[in-house]
Each structure stands twice: as C-alpha cells, then as structure tokens.
Image: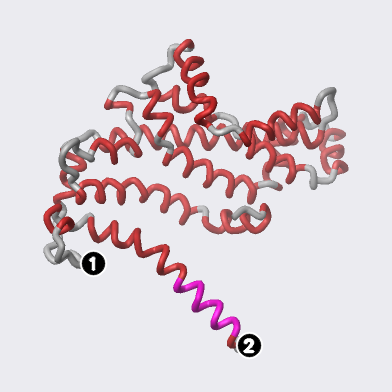
Amino acid sequence: MTRRFTWLEGVIIAVLLVCAAIMLLPYLWMVLSSFKSNLEIISSATSFVPQNPTLEGYRAVFEEAPFLTWLLNSAITAIIITAATLFTSALAGYIFAKFTFPGKKLMFLLVLATMMIPFQVIMIPTYLIISKLGLINNLTAIIVPSLISSYGVFLAKQFIEDIPRDLLEAARIDGAGELRIMWGIVMPLILPMLSALGIFTFMAAWNNYLWPLIAINDMDRMTVPMALVFFNGAHQVNYNVVMSAAVLITLPVIIVFLIFQKQFIKGLTMTGMK
C-alpha cells in the first residue's frame, strides 16, 4: 500500500534538500575550480563553471610532488589505525562490560577522562616518547599514538553490555575461549557500531594534519593533508593545484563511505552519533 505525503513532510523534505545543496555547494565549487587555470580563479570576472576547462592543476599535482607516495602513506596509516582501533576498542569494551576485577570502575573513569584532554596538551609528551623510541620521521610515529581510542572503548562497552550473559556462558560451556567468543559472537553483534566507528576513525586518521606535521620531516613520508601546505607557495598560491589536490584527497574518504554507507547509517541510528 502507498500513502500520500502530507504538506508537513513535503516542507521538511524541501528544507532538507536546500540544506544538502548548501553543504554540497563548497565541494562542487572546489571540484569545478580544479578544472580552471589559476588566472581564471583569481580573476574578478570568474564564473562558477570553468570557461576553459584544463587539467593543468592535476598535472602539477603529480609532476611537482610525489603525490602517489603521499596517498600510499596516508592509506597505510589510516587503514592500520582503523583496524587497530576497532580491535582494541572491541577487546577493551568486552573486558569492561563482561568481566569483574578490582579497580574496574576507576580504570574506566580514567579512560573516559582522557576524552576531555585536548591533543595539544599531550602533544609535547607524546613527541618526547616517540623520540625516545626512535620513531621520529617514520610512519610508525603516526600510527602508535592512535592505536587506542577512548571513545571507541566507551562505545563498545555500552553495546556489549546489552549482549545476554547466557549467550556467552553457553559458548564457554561448549569450550570456546574468550578470544573466540569475542571474535565469533561479540564482534558480529556489534558490527553496525564498529562500522560507524571505523568510518569516523578512518576519516580522522586520513585528515590528521597536526601530528604528522610534527613527527614527519622527510618528504617521502609525508601524508596527503600536508600536501595542501606543500602546494601553497611562500609568495604565490596556485589555487587550481590546491583545489586539484583537495579533490584527490577527498576521493578515498568518499569511496569508503559509499562502500560502507548502509552499515554506517545503521550504526549512527543505533549509537545516536551526530
């Protein structure tokens, strides 16, 4: 059976479409500007649509810098950080949710307390630790400080607490170990939450700029967010090159979202993320 939309639903849809168009407009402008020449962009008579489309910006991105290497570096760090964060969040959440041990509440409060500490506060201690470990100017320096997410632990604990204990006890009676229970029972049940957490973690790792700027000095180990600064000259900015690099940087995140959008939306609905 079908039903007619009410006038209120029509107004809501229209408002949402307008809001979506407003949010999409800057990205569309960036994509179109990447096909303009630098002169056309800075010209006062420039139009929204490129008058003389050119791939000059994209050519400069790949010829003036090792952009493919930067993409690979970002992909490696983002994928490893995402996978490690999902595993450690699920494991720690399982322990906090289903085990009882001395100091459990205090330890969980300390985990939550770290969520309120800005990275700028621990930036110098983190750098000193990474330096002592001899990891400066290495991709490992980007990965190690992001292997655990306090928010991920909190989110996993809240979800795992809703899993019936009888289900886990039945698996233990059948001889399953704790890791087997977590991997075979707990992980599939919290998959929507892990999908949403994974996308947010991947985006944060992919777009991370401040810490790689501090920890990486070698051009061949740079990540893509640092490319935008690289293409900004000291005396002149090639806007078409910057726009082209920005388009290329955002493509992987869009692809990841399109692949996992169903799990992402379901995870948002279940977790209440905004």
Is 150 left, or right, of 139 in this rendering?
A: right
Query: 10 Å neighbourhood of mark 1: few (<14), some, or many (≥20)?
Result: few
Quarter occupied by the C terminus: bottom right
Q: Amino acid at mark 2?
A: Arg
Query: Quick one: 70 or 218, which is closer to the camera?
Result: 218
Residue 9 to residue 195: above or below: below
Is 41 left, or right, of 136 in this rendering?
A: left
Q: In the image, residue 127 lies at what x, y percent?
A: 47, 19
Query: Quick one: 179 or 113, which is closer to the camera?
Result: 113
Q: Which mark is residue 79?
A: none
Residue under circle 1?
48
Q: In the image, residue 192 lies at what x, y percent?
A: 63, 51
How many numbered marks are there? 2
Residue located 67% across and 36% down the image? 153
Q: In the image, residue 202 lies at what x, y percent?
A: 49, 42
Quarter occupied by the N terminus: bottom right
Q: Amino acid at mark 1?
A: Phe
Residue located 76% across and 31% down the image? 95
Residue located 61% across and 55% down the image? 268
Q: Secondary structure at mark 2?
A: loop
Is 263 left, or right, of 271 in this rendering?
A: left
The quarter holding residue 7 reads bottom right
Q: In the image, residue 112 lies at what x, y percent?
A: 69, 35
Residue under circle 2?
3
Q: Decide whether residue 19 is among the magenta residues.
A: no
Magenta residues, as a range? 8-18
Q: Secondary structure at mark 1?
A: loop
The quarter holding residue 62 reads top left
**N-terminal label among 2 and 1:** 2
Query: Quick one: 73 or 52, which is closer to the camera?
Result: 52
